[in-house]
Structures are given as C-alpha cells and as structure tokens.
Amino acid sequence: MLVVGAERMSRILDWTDRSTCVIFGDGAGAVLLGEGDGYLASKLYTRGGDGVIKIPHYAGKSPFYENESEKPFVHMNGQETFKFAVSAMAKDLAEVIEKAGLTQDDIEWVVPHQANIRIIDAARRKLSIPEERFCTNIDRYGNTSAASIPILLDEINRSGKLKDGDHIALCSFGGGLSSAAGILKWIKK
C-alpha cells in the first residue's frame, strides 16, 4: 500500500501574517507499506471544531455566499495549538507504544510531525524516550504538513539509521483539532 502526504500550503497563506507564513512549507512524500507484521498499533483522535486552526473556503464571486469577510488563508491560535499538540503527541505516543506491547525503551526512532521544534521538544520531555531518538528536519523545510512524516522517514532511511527490526513511532496533529500516532516495525526487504 502506498501512503502519500502532499501539501501546497504557500497558496493558502496570508504573506502579511508573520504568525503563519514563516511556519509552513510545500512538500510531498510517500511511504510504501508492505504486507506482513510491520504494522503494530495506531490511534486517531478528532476533537472537532475550527476555533484553533481554521482555513476558510473561498466561494469566489458567488452571489449566494454571504460571508465575504473571511479570507481563505490559514488562521491559527498559536498558544492553543501548542497546548493541544504537546499534550496530544505525548499522550498518543504513550498509548500506541503500550497498545503495541512495547515500552518507551523499545522505540528506536520517533518521527513526529514537523510543526514546530518547541512542540516536539515539549512533547519529548513528557516521555522517557531519549532526545537523540527524536528525528527532525523542520530547520531545513519548515512545516510541510501532511508531507512532513514521509519526508523525514525517507531521510532517516537514506542516512542508514534505520535497521531491520527497529520500532518506529510516528505522531502528528492538525486542524479540526485532530491527532494520530502509530508504531511500525521496520522490515528491510
């Protein structure tokens, strides 16, 4: 199964809003998942609502659209996003690790959504997984949204860090306020 994550955030950013435009980047990535015992556990959570992260749609010049005041750009309450993300990433990771029958010591690599290095660091401090096992590339690409995990997974694979049998923890969060995490066992073919 091919899992693809792609985002072109630059087209929905207000380039005069420094609280969002400097955060996001465009990107695409894919991961090929094979059959077998490599998928160990996952979790998906959605709180619902757009009070914290919102991207209004654009109706164009339709005479049937009543609210022309909202521009079709990313709107984000940074403090609330931070609080939700830190809590959700740490909680989701702990839950899926336990669900997979593993301990935090069994995790060789954590591949988190690359939203913000402060979020990743704060979530990491709530867990007992060493800092050097948390992978990041946000310093080079920004937040490529849905593409961030497959891009980073490809980078650590190409670097030779991934070994057969490694347990990899993936975690993410996003709009609507949603979060997800999963545990994979890396199987080299």
Image (cartoon, helix red, strand yellow):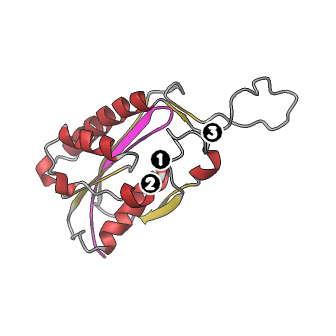
- At which x and y percent is residue 17? 57, 39
Magenta-drawn segment: 171-189
In the displayed structure, 134 sits above or below 123; it is below
Nearer to the camera, 103 or 159? 159
Residue beneath the point at 40% across and 38% down: 179
Tell me, yes or no, if residue 146 can be seen here.
yes
Quarter residue 119 falls in: top left
Nearer to the camera, 91 or 78? 78
Give the labeled residue for mark 3.
Answer: 73
Mark linked to residue 142: 2
Residue beneath the point at 37% across and 61% down: 152
- Residue 69 lies left or right of residue 7; in this view the side is right
Q: Is residue 182 magenta?
A: yes
Q: Is residue 116 magenta?
A: no
In the rendered structure, are the residues bearing label 1 and label 2 in contact, judged by CB atoms less than 8 Å apart? Answer: yes
What amino acid type should be assigned to the residue bearing mark 1? Ile
Tell me, yes or no, if residue 35 can be seen here.
no
Instruction: Tell me the element at label 3.
Output: loop
